[in-house]
Image (cartoon, rainbow, N blue to C red):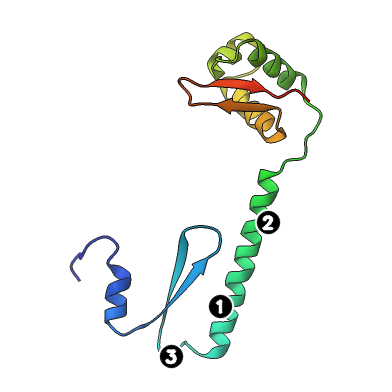
Amino acid sequence: MPYRGLGSGIPRVMAENCEVELIDRPDGNQFIARIWRTTQKDETTTQKANEELVSATQKEESTTQKSIIATPKPLTDTQKEILEYLHEHPTATRQEVAKVIDNITEDGVKYNIGRLQQYGVLKRVGGRKNGHWEVILQ
């Protein structure tokens, strides 16, 4: 079959009189197109497939919520040093921080900055070129 263009699959399937079920995903601007073979679609199969979809969606939502909300742990000495340096030098880059603080790589700085942002004690304002760091004191 020749290529007919990007995004043309669903209209072509619908034109061939296949049974197509469009399922709206509540987690964003997405949908699922389920194309049924004529021998497979019955009430039991449909109900079972929908239950699986709901279960998968609920698992995704709970995982997302866990990753967004991090329980603050006591800060490590390295994290405290990073906060102090960024408080004094708000326009510093990860490379600069890695050079100033002993025994940490640029990737280590990136990881710790991510953790500090999750904990809500560090915030990036603006873009990477013209932005700056804000240390949120609690």
132 vs 72, left or right, is: left
Residue at 64 percent of width and 18 percent of height:
104
Q: Which residue is mark 2?
A: 62
Q: Which residue is mark 1?
A: 49
Quadrant position of the C terminus in the picture: top right
The location of residue 118, given as percent across then percent down, is: 68, 35
Q: Determine crowd level at label 3: few under 14, some 14-19, many 20+ residues with C-alpha closer than 10 A.
A: few
Q: Total marks drawn? A: 3
The quadrant holding residue 109 is: top right
The location of residue 91, given as percent across then percent down, is: 55, 15
Q: Determine crowd level at label 1: few under 14, some 14-19, many 20+ residues with C-alpha closer than 10 A.
A: few
31 vs 5, left or right, is: right
Depth check, mark 2 against mark 3: the one in front is: 2
Residue positioned most to the left: 2
Residue nearest the observer in this picture, 109 or 23:
23
Q: Is residue 67 above or below residue 15?
A: above
The quadrant holding residue 37 is: bottom left
Residue at 20 percent of width and 71 percent of height:
1
Secondary structure beneath disc 1?
A: helix
The amino acid pointed to by label 1 is Ala
Q: Is residue 100 above or below residue 69?
A: above
Question: Which of marks 1 and 2 precedes in the sequence?
Answer: 1
Depth check, mark 2 against mark 1: the one in front is: 2
